[in-house]
Amino acid sequence: MGECSFWYRPTRVVPDQRPLNGRCCTLPYPELCFDNQFVFRPTGSTTAAVIALLHTVRTMLSANQYVHVFSFDFTKAFDTVRHETLMNKMAQLNIPDNIYNWIKAFFEQHFHCTRYAGKCSTVAAVKTSVIQGSGLGPASFIITAADLHPTTPGNCIFKFADDMYLVVPAANASSRLGEVSHVEAWASRINLRLNRTKSKELIFIQEKCGQSSHPPLPCPNIERVSCTKVLGITLNDRLSATDHVYNLLTSCSSLLYVMRVLHGHGISTESLHNVFRATILAKITYCLPAWSGLCSASDRAKLDSFLNRCVLVSVTILYPPYQKFLVILMTHYLKRF
């Protein structure tokens, strides 16, 4: 068994790939850059990605009348990455040869066939996909995407795994078409396909400019919208959290009704506590540092009103320790806006 490399090919790898990615970030290879990738990093998260994007937009608005933000959608990104392309980029990393060979063996000798109605198709070798469900899969994709950079100085790209956002200030507005074509050509080289129908363009306009600013026409086949979701947070062209708060409270109100129904069916208070923490509380606190500063007085009043409802509901269906936690949540997170 020691002489056969097949036995060393794992079916699943430990999911924490941050040490490998951390080492990649310090490599002197300009073509592979991980500074704008926010997944699998000690300080990386969706919150950090949204904060970095909004900070960049605000910084650009201080010197530009408007800023373009493109959100790109790639069709089945994790399933179409070529193994050959991935291993060529892996070879540029400063990792030991035995680790490289181990990863290479992990992606080799995968086959697929289809059996239907008693008949079986011919066996085909699988030469694409980063194997979703494996711990190595997402880390492999970010290495594949590490050589995507903006072509024009002053433009920025933010990445969170396969979610990618291009930020273009008004001063570089003429480069938009070239940047989108560059992203599309890059995707084609690595066997990805940019889905223009699901990609969106959002324009943030400086408040003092108002109607005086005239952004250029939209890019072909990319819809220009007034609000869009960025990593689960609804952003609008006014840099306001109103749309996000509305969607958040609509969803949480439905979940609060579900909790009442569960309570009526006799579910235990401890189980209700777990349901509340996993649904309503998780939704409210998701990326809270990123969008809390965008809330208006009206948004804060709506959030306060909903949390008061949660406290009232907790009097009858949640046990007292959790009532106290809700009060702390109100005062600590939402009263500080």
Image: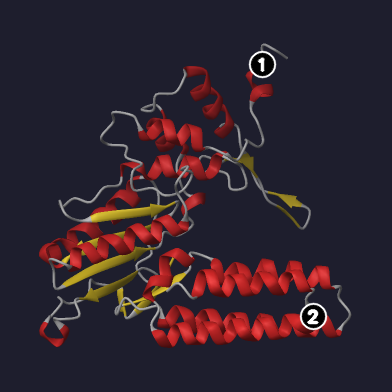
Q: Residue at x 32, y 64 (%)?
A: 54
Tell us which disc is closer to us: 1 or 2: 2
Question: Could you say which is closer to the camera, residue 298 or residue 166?
Answer: 298
Q: Nearer the viewer, residue 65 or 313?
A: 313
Please say whether residue 106 is visible from this viewpoint. yes
Quadrant where the C terminus is found in the figure: bottom left
Percent x, y for residue 7? 69, 22
Q: x and y percent of residue 278 in the render?
A: 68, 66
Query: In the image, 9: left or right of 65?
Result: right
> Taking 8 as reference, is 282 above or below it?
below
How many discs mark residues in the rendered view?
2
* Residue shown at the point (48%, 87%) measured from the top left: 301
Q: Is residue 129 visible?
A: no
47 or 101: nearer the eye? 47
> What separation in Å lies between label 1 and label 2 (alpha carbons)?
60 Å
Q: What amino acid does circle 1 point to?
A: Cys
- Tag 1 residue: 4
Q: Disc number at residue 90?
A: none
In the displayed structure, 16 sits above or below 39; it is above
Kind of residue sitting beneath label 2: Ile
Residue 47 shown left or right of residue 150 in the figure: right
* Left or right: residue 65 compared with residue 225: left
Q: Residue at x 45, y 51 (%)?
A: 161
Q: Residues within 10 Å of mark 2 (few under 14, many from 20)?
A: many
Residue shown at 62%/47% (left/top)? Answer: 133
Callout 1: SS: loop
Mark seen at residue 317: 2
Place of residue 90 in the rendered image (x, y in percent of width and height, measured from the top left): 42, 31
Colour logic: secondary structure
